[in-house]
Image: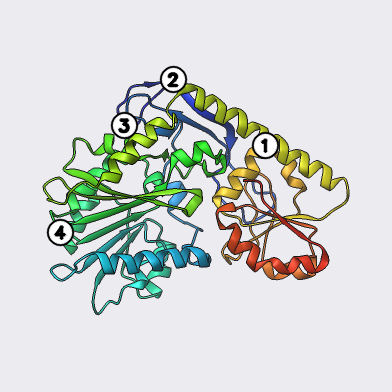
Amino acid sequence: MSSCQVCRKKINLSLIDMGHMPIANDLKKSKDNKCNLFPLEVLLCEYCKLFQLSVRINPQSIFSDYVYHSSYSSSWLAHAKNFANKVKNDIDFSQNNFIMEIASNDGYFLKNFDKSKFKILGLVPAENVADIARKNNIPTEAIFFNEDNATYLKNKYGKPKLIIANNVLAHVPDIKDFLRALDIVSAKETFISIEFPSVVNLIQDFQFDTIYHEHFTYLSLNTIENLINKLNLKVFRVEKLDTHGGSIRLWLAKKSNDIKIQKNVHLERSKELKSKIFDSETLKLFSRECFKRKDRFNNFLNEEKNKNLKIYAYGAAAKGISFLNFCGDNCKKILGVFDKNEMKQGCYIPGLNIEILDPKHINEIKPDYIIILPWNLKKEIKKDLSFISNWGGKLISFE
């Protein structure tokens, strides 16, 4: 029996046990490189409503040398640009023009701000990614954002007008420490934007492939409000987004800030509770359905491979790697995975030894099927790969 990482109470409820899996982004340089396997099970604390992994891996082993770069997705770049424009229109930066982004990756978001008008700073734990951001002229610290480093950042750079923490909170091993750090580094007039995939969508739409070791927690508005209850922070606005199969953006400020809490915060809080995602029967249904989908995918591979068809996949992101490893050794029938990220090409999918290939080879290989693994980018990928219909190739996904 595990204890909750936040409230330390015993946890009895399991969302899903996916068995022992490799770290999704631990790509292998050669085909026969063995990888370590770790338990991958999501538990629910009934008290603080936090969905969390039963076993947490040391974040240094996951994030110190990182292969995910946001700039390889055109739709994600467009999302970042739209949000940057919204921020510039909605927030008054006349008294304080400092913007700090936590988990800024390769600078894909901060590059939308003119440095002659804004003071910007990116934070990312991986030195290799920080180097890329700096080469793109984005001031970046290679640092984990936590309570200790928040004091250092506050003293060195001052308190920002805007803090961006998009798609990072689930990657934080100690979420209470992270939220305390936000409290430390923010001023009364600071606004904080936190964006994350909604656990409501994850459960209702059976998005089991978004579960992997990099995601220590799976979040909702109710959970965040429980966590910040004893801090000097409040959620004052909620925005629902289509990204990652359904995300939520929370706007936070100091409790001492006189900005009013919008009505949609109360509505979303109530909606989450009515969705019954915290009920034991909902958890059991989720697990059963996910294993049914695993069986359907393996049946597809068996049937089509028996016809001697060439089956490939597209997108060697953590989502796809988690999906393939959950479905098991049968996925070795997939002949290769195409990906635009040069850092991944020539490597192998951990646990399965499937080679990652440059998409430029698609024309010469002429696959019969390409399975779209990052289904959240399906529209973009279908547009990019529509040419495979020239030889009768098919693009399919299994979300």
Q: Is residue 240 above or below residue 110?
A: above
Query: Residue 317: where, in percent of width, then height?
Result: 56, 54
Q: What residue type is labelled 4?
A: Asn
Residue visible at 50% across and 58% down?
Answer: 68
State which tag comes first along the sequence, 2 or 4: 2
State how far apart marks 3 and 2 are (Cα): 15 Å
State which tag comes first along the sequence, 2 or 1: 2
Quadrant of the rendering where the N terminus is positioned? top left
State which tag comes first along the sequence, 1 or 4: 4
Which residue has dot 4 on it? 155
Callout 4: SS: helix
**Foreground pick, 102 / 46:** 46
The answer to whether residue 57 is visible is no
Q: How dense is the environment of label 2, judged by Cα within 10 Å: few (below 14), some, or many (20 and up)?
A: few
Query: Residue 392: where, in percent of width, then height?
Result: 82, 63
Callout 2: SS: loop
**Foreground pick, 127 / 153:** 153
Query: Residue 235: where, in percent of width, then height?
Result: 25, 45
Which residue has dot 2 on it? 12
Q: Which amino acid does label 2 sit on?
A: Asn
* Circles 3, 2 touching at the beta carbon (< 8 Å): no
Question: Which residue, as the protein is rendered here, is positioned at the far right?
Answer: 307
* Circles 2, 1 touching at the beta carbon (< 8 Å): no
State which tag comes first along the sequence, 3 or 2: 3
State how far apart marks 3 and 4 are (Cα): 28 Å
Horizontally, residue 363 falls left or right of residue 242, namely right
Which residue has dot 3 on it? 6
Which residue has dot 1 on it? 294
Q: Which amino acid does label 3 sit on?
A: Val
Question: Which residue, as the protein is rendered here, is positioned at the far bottom?
Answer: 116
Horizontally, residue 131 falls left or right of residue 245, namely left
